[in-house]
Image (cartoon, grey):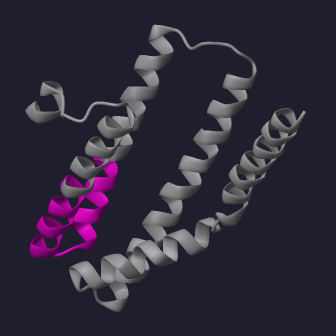
Amino acid sequence: MKKVFLAVLMLVGITTFAQGKREQKEKLTTEQRVELQAKKMKLDLDLNDKQVADVKKLLLEQAKKREAKKEEFQAKKDDAKKPTSDEIYAMKNKMLDEQIANKAEMKKILTPEQYKKWEENREEGKSKMKKRFAKRKGNTEESPKLEEK
């Protein structure tokens, strides 16, 4: 009887602890995330006030597009309807077009030196994310595919 009671008590404790962690993470609004990202870019790239305003505007547009796509994707996921290969191709193609447009806009806003540093920061962030993703998947070594890019 003691063992059953201890097992139930431990199960309740673990469940409560796990739920408490999720609740601690507070969500920031889109505007707050954009503001923080713009300030970080101002520090990293030494942006002037006009550049900061332009970057904020661009980041806010991107964030709103991203949220709309996320909701659309979630709705499709809830319907349990998997996209066809043509739909996947169209989505990826559109995403790449948007990335190209984003880079072009950033190139207009930033000076050549700032743009170069922005590109370097992006590449560094991508490599960190790939390492985290590989670690989360259980691969302690990076796959050869990740090293090629």
Question: Going 72% across and 30% down the picture, which residue do you hit?
Answer: 75
Question: Going 36% across and 86% down the picture, which residue do you hit?
Answer: 50
Q: Nearer the viewer, residue 50 or 134?
A: 134
**Vertical comparison of 48 with 13: above or below:** below
- On whether residue 113 falls in the magenta region, the answer is yes
**Vertical comparison of 127 with 82: above or below:** below
Q: Is residue 83 left or right of residue 53?
A: right
**Vertical comparison of 85 with 24: above or below:** above
Query: Which quadrant holds residue 77?
Result: top right
Residue 144 coordinates in the image, percent (x, y): 12, 26
**Vertical comparison of 145 with 14: above or below:** above
Question: Going 74% across and 52% down the picture, which residue do you hit?
Answer: 19
Furthest residue in direction front, as rendered: 2
Furthest residue in direction bottom, as rendered: 49
Q: Is residue 74 left or right of residue 104?
A: right
Image quarter hosting the N terminus: top right
Q: Is residue 54 left or right of residue 7?
A: left
Find the magenta span and give its range: 100-123
Question: Going 50% across and 16% down the picture, which residue do you hit?
Answer: 87
Residue 124 coordinates in the image, percent (x, y): 19, 56
Query: Which quadrant holds residue 90?
Result: top left
Q: Nearer the viewer, residue 139 or 32?
A: 139
Q: Nearer the viewer, residue 38 or 135?
A: 135
Magenta: main secondary structure equals helix
Residue 21 coordinates in the image, percent (x, y): 66, 58
Residue 29 coordinates in the image, percent (x, y): 65, 68
